[in-house]
Image (cartoon, coloured by chain):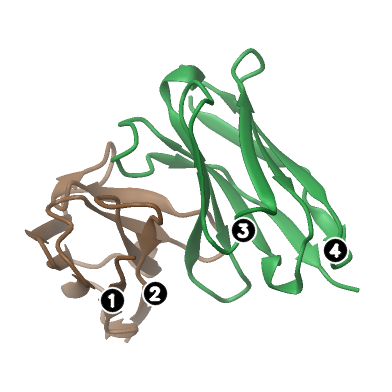
Chain colours: A brown, B green
């Protein structure tokens, strides 16, 4: 099983600033990595797939990078609606499909 | 517009059974791998099960293997999750999720979820 580890667990950021979230895989997942956003009380939604491709309708302030075992989600110019929990997920080798434990981005 | 509407959740005693349904619309259902993902209260996301477009191939997490069965009826554009021998730790919001790119692709869209509570 590929274990996905996200850091930090909580990130405090002021509106307008940049947030950098990390995700590490226990073994290579190539670029088969997705990021999801989950706002309170809502279902997750796809932000990034293929490690760096934004999903339909996702603003350009969201960007993904990395490959193999190290990945980053960057949110530039945080807006109020961006304060949420973010999950990474690998879909390179499964079952099982695995998610990271999540990073909560909160208002500083 | 893509829509996934889950139903069938509720309160059930340990050892009981439930069948979740997910009605899909707005896309070519048979072309999508469909999945169930759950989220226990205050916890992260856990993949549960996946089924191929034809329904002929299925996968389940070890935590539910032998107890849950995923299936689909493409004539009704509906996904199912038959859950039996339910445990307290199965308590979660269950999301119906679609993946357009086949087995090795991200989860494009999610339903709003249905709540399953296993308690005596």
Secondary structure of residue under mark 4:
loop
Between marks 4 and 2, how big is the CA–CA gap?
28 Å
Between marks 4 and 1, how big is the CA–CA gap?
34 Å
Residue underneath mark 2: A101
Residue B85, x across and y down, in percent: 79, 59
Q: Are marks 2 and 1 in contact (CB under 8 Å)?
A: yes
Judged by depth in the image, the label closer to the viewer, 4 or 2, is 4
Labels 2 and 1 share a subunit: yes
Labels 3 and 1 share a subunit: no
Secondary structure of residue under mark 1:
strand
Q: Is residue B106 left or right of residue B42?
A: left
Between marks 3 and 2, how big is the CA–CA gap?
20 Å
Q: Specify few, some or many for label 2: CA neighbours under 10 Å numbering under 14, 14-19, or 20 or more.
A: many
Labels 4 and 3 share a subunit: yes
Above/below status of B3 relative to A88: above
Q: Is residue A45 left or right of residue B15?
A: left
Between marks 2 and 1, how big is the CA–CA gap?
6 Å
Residue underneath mark 1: A6
In the rendered image, the residue lying farthest to the front is B66
Residue A18, x across and y down, in percent: 16, 73
Q: Specify few, some or many for label 3: CA neighbours under 10 Å numbering under 14, 14-19, or 20 or more.
A: some
Say which label, 4 or 3, has the lower sequence index.
4
Residue underneath mark 4: B15
Name the residue rendered at 63%, 50% in the picture: B113
Which quadrant is the C terminus of chain B positioned in?
A: bottom right
Q: Are marks 4 and 3 in contact (CB under 8 Å)?
A: no
Q: Chain of mark 1?
A: A
Residue B77, x across and y down, in percent: 61, 20
Between marks 3 and 1, how big is the CA–CA gap?
25 Å
Residue underneath mark 3: B64
Judged by depth in the image, the label closer to the viewer, 3 or 1, is 3
């Amino acid at each position: 099983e590929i274990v996905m580890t996200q850091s930090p667990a909580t990130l405090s950021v002021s509106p307008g600033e940049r947030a950098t979230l990390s995700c590490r895989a226990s073994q290579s997942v190539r670029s088969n990595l997705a990021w999801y956003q989950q706002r309170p009380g809502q279902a997750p939604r796809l932000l990034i797939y293929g490690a760096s491709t934004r999903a339909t309708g996702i603003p350009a302030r969201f960007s993904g990078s990395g490959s193999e075992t190290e990945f980053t989600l960057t949110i530039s110019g945080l807006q109020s609606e961006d304060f949420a929990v973010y999950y990474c997920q690998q879909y390179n080798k499964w079952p099982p499909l695995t998610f990271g434990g999540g990073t909560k981005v909160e208002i500083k | 517009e893509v829509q996934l509407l889950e139903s069938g959740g509720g309160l059930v005693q340990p050892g009981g059974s439930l069948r979740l349904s997910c009605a899909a619309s707005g896309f070519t259902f048979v072309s999508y791998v469909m999945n169930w993902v759950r989220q226990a209260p205050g916890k992260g996301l856990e993949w549960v099960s996946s089924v191929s477009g034809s329904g002929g191939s299925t996968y389940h997490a070890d935590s539910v293997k032998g107890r849950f069965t995923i299936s689909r009826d493409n004539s009704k554009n509906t996904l199912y999750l038959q859950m039996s021998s339910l445990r307290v730790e199965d308590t979660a919001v269950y999301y119906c999720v679609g993946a357009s790119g086949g087995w090795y692709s991200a989860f494009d869209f999610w339903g709003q979820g249905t709540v399953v509570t296993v308690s005596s």
